[in-house]
Image: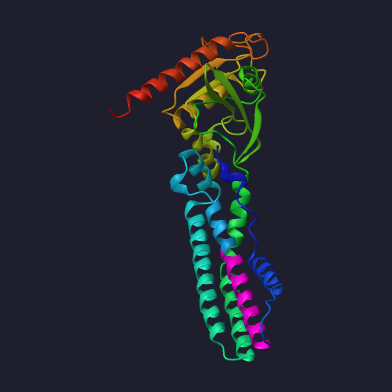
């Protein structure tokens, strides 16, 4: 589970960052043996406070964002769709430059203040520091604004556990996908946001012995032909390739879902073409209703008919995948 989703702090604008730093500096007042000593120590304290606060804040921003090379493919793909890997990398590099420059200015001007011969020179040097420091912070305003938007997007990513096996449920709306997830889940399924869908995805968890696997319904994603999506939507949907271990495609032969068998089969073909490497189970729903049989296994999420058999088949396939993965490990 990705913990960075809610650990990225609020990103301040350049002006907010400066206002906070300068407000902290305004409260600095250091006693001295004489007037000159008091002014020098106070200004040293102000420059130190400004530099430390700003550098610490920028570094906190940089460290909070995910590193693409450390992310699994599922989240990496979604982040690229929403934000852009290179854009985020560039913004964080610029913030890193800014943090280093702030530390450099802090060191330079602290040295100059310490060497200043009188109060007027201390004031002159401190004023120059404020000007140069503000200029450096303002240069990364576009990067701070970009990181603000990136943070908002990242907080909308689904909280999906990419370390467990996952079954994705596909098919047209109203064929019984969400009812199936609810029926087989050990606990009440949760709803998580997903890019380019207003309904979000429904995530259930199923205990199988001492293991747990995820079952995900994808309303707004795998419920119409992928060829009808724009490029960005399609990329977000295809990120599911890196999440799904099995796809269960549900067909409603009664057509009470509002879609003909032909349209449902067209969607099935689209899913097969776009997810060629993922095992796919085809089942019929609403076995309690009359419909044109297609020879596929039948179930009813309403009555539970055929659900246990489907679960056993799914768990058998998941077990076979685990065994196959172990066989691929180097010896």
Q: Is residue 143 visible?
A: no
Horizontal side, residue 232 vs residue 13: left or right: left
Q: Is residue 83 visible?
A: yes
Answer with the quarter of the image where residue 20 lies: bottom right
Which part of the image, by quadrant, shows the C terminus? top left
As drawn, the residue found furthest toward the left would be 331
The residue nearer to you, when weighing 167 against 230, is 167
Residue 88 x, y percent position in the rendering: 51, 55
Residue 189: say if magenta: no
Examine the rendered structure and indicate whether residue 128 appears above or below residue 14: below
**Which residue appears at 52% of the width and 70% of the height?**
103
**Which residue appears at 53% of the width and 43% of the height?**
78
How many marks the image carries: the answer is 0
Examine the rendered structure and indicate whether residue 139 appears above or below residue 186: below
Residue 47 x, y percent position in the rendering: 60, 75
Residue 325 x, y percent position in the rendering: 37, 25
Examine the rendered structure and indicate whether residue 223 appears above or below residue 9: above
Residue 37: say if magenta: yes
Look at the image and give the residue range highlighted in magenta: 35-55
Q: Main secondary structure of the magenta part?
A: helix
Examine the rendered structure and indicate whether residue 140 appears above or below residue 105: above
Which part of the image, by quadrant, shows the N terminus? top right
């Amino acid at each position: 589970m990705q913990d960075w989703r809610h650990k990225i702090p609020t990103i301040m604008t350049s002006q907010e960052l400066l206002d906070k730093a300068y407000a902290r500096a305004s409260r600095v007042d250091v006693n001295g043996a004489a007037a000159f000593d008091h002014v020098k120590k106070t200004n040293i304290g102000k420059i130190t406070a400004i530099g430390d606060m700003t550098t610490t804040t920028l570094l906190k921003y940089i460290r909070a964002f995910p590193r693409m090379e450390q992310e699994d493919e599922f989240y990496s793909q979604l982040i690229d769709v929403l934000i852009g890997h290179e854009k985020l990398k560039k913004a964080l590099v610029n913030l890193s430059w800014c943090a280093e420059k702030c530390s450099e200015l802090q060191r330079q001007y602290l040295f100059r203040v310490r060497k200043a011969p009188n109060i007027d020179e201390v004031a002159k040097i401190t004023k120059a520091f404020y000007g140069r420091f503000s200029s450096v912070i303002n240069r990364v305003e576009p990067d701070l604004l970009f990181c603000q938007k990136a943070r908002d997007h990242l907080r909308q990513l689904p909280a999906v556990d990419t370390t467990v096996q996952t079954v994705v449920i596909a098919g047209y709306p109203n064929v019984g996908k969400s009812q199936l997830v609810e029926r087989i889940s050990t606990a009440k399924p949760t709803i998580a946001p997903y890019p380019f869908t207003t309904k979000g995805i429904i995530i259930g968890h199923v205990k199988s012995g001492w293991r747990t696997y995820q079952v995900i319904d994808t309303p707004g994603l795998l419920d119409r032909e992928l060829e009808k999506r724009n490029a960005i939507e399609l990329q977000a949907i295809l990120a599911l390739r890196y999440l799904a271990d099995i796809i269960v495609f549900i067909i409603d032969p009664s057509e009470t879902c509002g879609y003909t068998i032909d349209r449902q089969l067209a969607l099935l073909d689209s899913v097969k073409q776009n997810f060629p490497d993922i095992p796919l189970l085809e089942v019929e729903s609403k076995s309690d209703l009359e419909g044109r049989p297609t020879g596929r296994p039948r179930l009813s999420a309403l009555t539970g008919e055929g659900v246990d058999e489907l679960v056993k088949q799914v768990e058998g396939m998941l077990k076979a995948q685990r065994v196959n993965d172990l066989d691929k490990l180097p010896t």
